Image: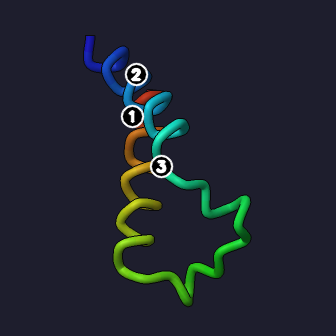
Amino acid sequence: MKKQLFKILAKANKVILPSFTRRQLDISRASKFQLAIIGWRAYVTFRALD
């Protein structure tokens, strides 16, 4: 149940949130908001893959 929820969230993140790797964002120059989005996407992805 929990894993399925994170898989749905991962698909929603892919559609809604921006992809900073396509924009070639330098993480050392990223704003706090951009770092929060990167962290959230990583958290959801890792939880979906468990």
Measuring from the top left, give residue 20's x and y in whole percent.
Answer: 61, 63
Q: Residues within 10 Å of mark 3 (few under 14, many from 20)?
A: few
Q: Which residue is mark 3?
A: 17
Sequence-first disc among 3 and 2: 2
In the rendered image, which residue does mark 1 sit on?
47
Q: Secondary structure at mark 1?
A: helix
Helix, strand or loop for disc 3: loop
- Amino acid carrying label 1: it is Arg
Residue 7 vs 38, above or below: the answer is above
Give SS at disc 2. helix
Disc 1 and disc 3: Cα gap in Å?
Answer: 17 Å
Residue 8, labelled with which disc? 2
- Mark 1 or mark 2, whichever is nearer to me: 2
Q: Nearer the viewer, mark 3 or mark 2?
A: 3
The kind of residue tagged 3 is Leu
Question: Is 33 above or below relative to 42?
Answer: below
Judge left or right: residue 3 versus residue 19: left
Please report the residue visible at 26 percent of the width from the left and 10 percent of the height from the top.
1
Foreground residue, 19 or 1? 19
Q: Locate residue 6: give its quadrant.
A: top left
User: Would residue 47 appear left or right of 21 to someone viewing this image?
Assistant: left
